[in-house]
Image: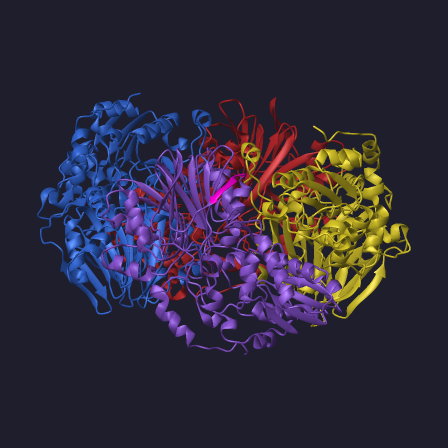
Chain colours: A blue, B red, C purple, D yellow
Amino acid sequence: MSYEVKSLNEECGIFGVWGHPEASSVTYFGLHSLQHRGQEGAGIVSNDAGVLHGYRDLGLLSEVFKDDRDLQRLKGNAAIGHVRYATAGNGSVDNIQPFLFKFYDCSCGLAHNGNLTNAKSLRRELEADGAIFHSNSDTEILMHLIRRSRKETWLDKLKEALQTVQGGFAYILMREDCMVAALDANGFRPLAIGQMKNGAYVIASETCALEVIGADFVRDVQPGEIIIINDDGFTVDHFTNETQHAICSMEYIYFARPDSNIAGVNVHTARKNMGRILAAEAPVEADMVIGVPNSSLSAASGYAEASGIPYEQGLVKNQYIARTFIQPTQELREQGVRMKLSAVRGVVAGKKVIMVDDSIVRGTTSRRIVQLLKEAGALEVHVRIASPPLKYPCFYGIDIQTRKELIAANHSVAEICECIGADSLSFLSEDGLIEAIGLDFDAPYSGLCMAYFNGDYPTPLYDYEEQYQASLKEKVSFFN
Amino acid sequence: MSYEVKSLNEECGIFGVWGHPEASSVTYFGLHSLQHRGQEGAGIVSNDAGVLHGYRDLGLLSEVFKDDRDLQRLKGNAAIGHVRYATAGNGSVDNIQPFLFKFYDCSCGLAHNGNLTNAKSLRRELEADGAIFHSNSDTEILMHLIRRSRKETWLDKLKEALQTVQGGFAYILMREDCMVAALDANGFRPLAIGQMKNGAYVIASETCALEVIGADFVRDVQPGEIIIINDDGFTVDHFTNETQHAICSMEYIYFARPDSNIAGVNVHTARKNMGRILAAEAPVEADMVIGVPNSSLSAASGYAEASGIPYEQGLVKNQYIARTFIQPTQELREQGVRMKLSAVRGVVAGKKVIMVDDSIVRGTTSRRIVQLLKEAGALEVHVRIASPPLKYPCFYGIDIQTRKELIAANHSVAEICECIGADSLSFLSEDGLIEAIGLDFDAPYSGLCMAYFNGDYPTPLYDYEEQYQASLKEKVSFFN
Amino acid sequence: MSYEVKSLNEECGIFGVWGHPEASSVTYFGLHSLQHRGQEGAGIVSNDAGVLHGYRDLGLLSEVFKDDRDLQRLKGNAAIGHVRYATAGNGSVDNIQPFLFKFYDCSCGLAHNGNLTNAKSLRRELEADGAIFHSNSDTEILMHLIRRSRKETWLDKLKEALQTVQGGFAYILMREDCMVAALDANGFRPLAIGQMKNGAYVIASETCALEVIGADFVRDVQPGEIIIINDDGFTVDHFTNETQHAICSMEYIYFARPDSNIAGVNVHTARKNMGRILAAEAPVEADMVIGVPNSSLSAASGYAEASGIPYEQGLVKNQYIARTFIQPTQELREQGVRMKLSAVRGVVAGKKVIMVDDSIVRGTTSRRIVQLLKEAGALEVHVRIASPPLKYPCFYGIDIQTRKELIAANHSVAEICECIGADSLSFLSEDGLIEAIGLDFDAPYSGLCMAYFNGDYPTPLYDYEEQYQASLKEKVSFFN
Amino acid sequence: MSYEVKSLNEECGIFGVWGHPEASSVTYFGLHSLQHRGQEGAGIVSNDAGVLHGYRDLGLLSEVFKDDRDLQRLKGNAAIGHVRYATAGNGSVDNIQPFLFKFYDCSCGLAHNGNLTNAKSLRRELEADGAIFHSNSDTEILMHLIRRSRKETWLDKLKEALQTVQGGFAYILMREDCMVAALDANGFRPLAIGQMKNGAYVIASETCALEVIGADFVRDVQPGEIIIINDDGFTVDHFTNETQHAICSMEYIYFARPDSNIAGVNVHTARKNMGRILAAEAPVEADMVIGVPNSSLSAASGYAEASGIPYEQGLVKNQYIARTFIQPTQELREQGVRMKLSAVRGVVAGKKVIMVDDSIVRGTTSRRIVQLLKEAGALEVHVRIASPPLKYPCFYGIDIQTRKELIAANHSVAEICECIGADSLSFLSEDGLIEAIGLDFDAPYSGLCMAYFNGDYPTPLYDYEEQYQASLKEKVSFFN
């Protein structure tokens, strides 16, 4: 959630509900709990007895939907919604989801979380055949494939399309007569089914969204599944049976909310376990353990508990940082003006500190925090990272697309330690991570995707293969 | 900082800087770290070589000052700023500070934190004598008193005015040739002096604002002092020598940021001590300690540490709650839709839980959180409050103005426990609070104001006396 | 231009420039003079050395482009722009033009004025073949046809597409290496070529846009032409040679700005002639002639001049009406509250008045104005309409789509006179209109489209034929 | 109304209604018709059974009050409103009226049109005596005088205050129990009383506001009068009997709407008479008469009628100019880009033109229009100004405050003619103006203020005297 000080970004949260008289409100509150998955845009498509209405715009959910009237226009008993993270330069409303397609024969809403590995080649083929795309998003591809499919039924068309796209994807479609969810063959992205007290079924990226709307957890969507929800309940179909779990480990480490469960494992508990195992793997004598707010607090408390060293609040994060567009000038920064994190002088001065963070991307943030702590009087700062070194890009929906931006892809742990100015540095081991999360799927790494750490991608890389191979040969220095 | 779930509200944060080429930017960043003290409005008055410029509006600081151009208009080497909490109905920009007064013979900016106890009678006297007020704020009174004073010098006029107003006040004035800070005779509100690396002096409600702008702490402003800052540095004068420390204990308990120091005591450390002493005073067997985010996390970790019971993240607060104007309908609330806090089922289910909170006002929030935890499967919920019961209103700047809204003014601890549905309930003792904070002024309660807990007000109540006496005779029931 | 009191609406103005360093600014000023052709949305696509940038939004041009920075983002030496009139309910930004298409092999901007008569069937065919549309606008069709064409060159693809669409259309396309304009085979919509002082070529819906940007008029685009503009100047090609002028007579009567010339005829002069001929055709004794502001002032002064009766300003239009969303309640309307037009009591009281208007659609406005004049004391109100009765819908780009809304399609002149409460009523004859405009093309009606008056459509009606035939059988009464 | 191309600015329109259930809506529509008197800010204060509510902001009325909800908050049976013209730099909402004062003993709203000649000295005296002003406006002065008066009754306090202020003023006050209007002893500004169909009384700057809300004209407010309106109707009182009409002649010439009557004289008719007399005083042979839109159209038609020369629409004004913040760069201007006015080439090319305008301030606009007409091919341009040369500043409410900005104060008619590039130039004579308006008060100039033309100010100039005398000695050249 400390997305502002990190260059890691999830690409979206999705939500859908079928069978509730205030469907768009329910979707609003569901999306609200998924806001940490994307802050750049939001939208809702509702289904009013077969007529689909949509609204979407750039900004936080609360900026897109400002008051009740904004939701009242989205009438109907069913709705899907989306919160989006957008990379700079693509900040056009055209890319905000859900997309709403209106055809002469039907209408359809579409929301997507993930990244397709063959999007570029599919888009080029489709365009060469006359297709017109209206966004930069790879989400549109699915709809072009469906509409061009020669299969008979919409379900067969959908299956054919889902078999054509590759990579990581969790889709929710709103049709006039049903709502459909689908998950890629590896289950990279989380997707859960819940049921509200009035019987309405909901689909959500994370279970925290079920909690927020008072829904009971029913089951996770499984890899390769198509879930079809209508007034009769939900049915399960498959577009493929060649599936193998490879759940994104970064969801547990950093992205998901601590109160969410993924594949039955609570995220806070997993993080606390990461801290506990890290304490065992990389002990150090110190006066206190402090976590980098907010995503590392669970791991830090696990480390403290396992080590017996007191847990202290040595760093404070400004709660109002999210939407500030005014930043200190270079000159003010040099004079020590900073906005996001403050070290608590009264706590850390004269103390040996263990600083627990969830991960290191470029190292810039870690260096800054170590410096903050030392300026506030910390005698020693021992950095403990509750995940293995990030060395490889992700192609399934997380914004780590080049090895050049990963310090651990270019430097040894000792070099990183020197670079960030820490007195010592340790990372959690890969085995430690797998143990901490504790999945037990019959799949490599117990069902986790560990590719960012070891380059072992669970699928072919398609359009990214060439660029990836090239990146393996490059090295850059993070010492300037 | 969890101001949304609490009916306690501070009335403002103030900041000033003299001698920095980017004075309005420095003020922006200083105010940014004081945003927790008021979210309803913000403003800055700058001093450009004797010409004062001002801008203020309703909203968060980042909404009032949207981009760099908004600050560039506020040129000059000195500036003062204000963030404001406004009670409903007074949401007019006329009440947003700093006020900027332009007279034929001079200009003056004025920012105020606190509450005057004789504001009503002073205003009536002034109006009866022809004065025209343009806001509902009691801040204007000081300027009317200054302008009507028959004293010779501006400093004597100011002293006379400061001797006339009663209650809790921390003022910063921006004059053409100097910046002035003043603190009431009891020092109810915190106010600190710092110095930036370039030599510029700053004044701020909390020391966290000094940290954020890279300023060194110089000293606290003392009760009865007038601090005059100009290009030659700062000088200290007094409007009264009859002073006695009565620092607001709620600053330590709830309002101030954990990284601030007040009277040399770190707020996080004080809170952790409150938790530690509470653990000793009110032990209970349980599986875990959880804090109500965000203000109770320090106390909860102190309790956990002292008791040896693990500290867990059993409650998660939505980071994006602050500016949401869409609220669940009654029907959705009954169906369990909630936005602010979620209980972490995976953590608390089947467990005995100690829930630490900083204070109880009406009890509504506590009841809701206990219910949340039980619905998430907690077997027992033992509530521990890291401050004594709130029984008396505050007249010095905190929005607890009537005993009717205070459950502890109307019910015993056992009744409150029943009302909030807890399995047990304990409060920190008054002595425990005083010990936890650990001031040692030669004044009652070691220099704290404890009036909310015991009705022992350090000053006469003036305009509030009658209403206060009446309130002592009223009783209301919080069981409905 | 009195579009607010009339239910006639043009569907758009288009503009393009190639070869000017401030192309998007030039486009802004050009569009500004075309704002009367559409007030619901505006957009610009610029060409920055082959890279196309676009921005569009709902609202007046001055609302969409608020300050210079909004234009500075649209860099480049060429640009096209569009102002749009949108029917209620389609008020989505998706429909605002120019459309900007980005393909793997090229980019293209597209702006359109007009209406296609085979849009519905083309769209259905394209969708059935897998095409996905992203707007309700028929403009997208052209791009789908181009992209699906099997022809070799882009120019042949464009020609094929232009041969496929039917109806009224004026297009401007921005390609990476040239700007292209095209006009339908009847030249329903005006489209002119101009040249700026620096040599840049411009294309505009009306010549008033050339005046505003200081460009010289070069020539009108002729029916069936494709104009290709690049750094070498402009070349003329044709997509068809089967052409015949049928210029929209409503452009002369009502839509176009009086300072525009269409096919060499000045609009103000044509209107003044309409008034002159009307005075000869339908004389009446009276004290004064007044025009309904603003579109009828030219005709009224013509009538006055020819009749020798003084021209007076008996009606005043509020200049600030355009963007007012607060309207009088029914009760206030009944009490006589009105906002748009006021009768000048001091001028009309006790007088016999000739009120000249350009056209009558439903008669509601005329009735209201007659009533206004009588309430202000006019003894007699003789209504003279400077065009023939509107009896038939338009399918080529003007929003008169059903005979039910046309009082003259359902009532005789005598009945209309009674309905609007006038003392007498006369319309200009069809011959009078043709004479007043004075075109001399070798085509029916000297090259005018007179279909709204006589149902003589210059083309087949395609998708509208059925609906049109049905409408001929319906009759409704405008007396309620 | 062509305020954008002229440096003349009225300072406000005021409106009030007592006794209508939709008082704030009525005020909105009344102000809407007065928008030409001020476009920089607007506000309304309503009276809801003795409780006053106010709202005001910068911008056009339709920007300040965006939808019905904005008015619904201003409940009550009575309301006053204000539209304001503000000089650059004072664009603060603090200056927008009506002011709403809330005292311990009463509340009061205040709206003002005019300018006080002793404002500066009164303000200085009041401030020296401790008064605090919150705006730059001189309107506040009246309230300070009222509140400081030692008289017994509010009416006597008001009279004393009205006797103290000097210059031009029309006030409307909203008290809890009545609405009060007052006019200065010379009646510089127009102010009329009307009555709605339900019996409610209204007060308005111009009678066009009565027409718009369906009210009947009752009478003009006379110089020196105080009109008190409550549920029993209206009563007339006086604060002075030493009165003499000196109605602002610029209201007839330029400011007021043509459909307004002032002192019983219709503005359009007066303007047409100015044109007629001008034709007699300054005939010239030509092909056509054209008026500068919009304010000169009446005078132009009068000139045409009297001279027998045809009236043509040779200049067209863009209807959408009002709120455009994007202006052509210098370079674009040099290339001929212009936005506000266009000459109609098809009308004026090859013709001798008489261009009628209402007045000349700096001559810049006239020069530009002459140039426009010549570039469009006019052979000769004879400028005829329907008022005498403007040579002296106004101190009673019109923004002509220095002789340096008046070309006629610095140059002869022949020089002005040369400067603007006209083939001939004539102004209406002073006697011609007086005759055209046709008042018959027993006062100098039949009751008109002619000071702008001859320097004969009807009152002492007080605070402006020194500056005025100095200005008489200065001369500047308008040839650059």
Q: Nearer the viewer, residue B141 or D380?
A: D380
Does C125 sit left or right of B192 as displayed?
left
Q: Visible in this render: residue C3?
A: no
Measured from the top left, where is residue A200 in percent x and y? 27, 65
Does B108 lie within the magenta span?
Answer: no
Q: Is residue C401 above or below residue B295?
A: below
Q: Residue at x 18, y 57 (%)?
A: A158
Q: Is residue C241 above or below residue C174?
A: below
For the C terminus of chain B, the quadrant is: bottom left
Measured from the top left, where is residue D218 in percent x and y? 78, 66
Q: Nearer the viewer, residue C459 or A14?
A: C459
Does D148 sit left or right of C357 as displayed?
right
Q: What stretch of residues is rendered in magenta?
A: C214-219
Measured from the top left, where is residue A343 in percent x and y? 39, 32
Q: Visible in this render: residue D42?
A: yes
Q: Is residue A346 above or below residue C444?
A: above
Does D15 sit left or right of C296 as displayed?
right
Does C218 lie within the magenta span?
Answer: yes
Does B47 sit left or right of A279 as displayed?
right
The kind of secondary structure the magenta stretch mainly shows is strand
Measured from the top left, where is residue A12 in percent x and y? 29, 47
Q: Nearer the viewer, residue B99 or A175?
A: A175
For the N terminus of chain B, the quadrant is: top left
Residue A336, image quadrant:
top left
Q: How many marks?
A: 0
Q: Nearer the viewer, residue A70 or A199?
A: A70
Q: Residue at x 32, y 29 (%)?
A: A364
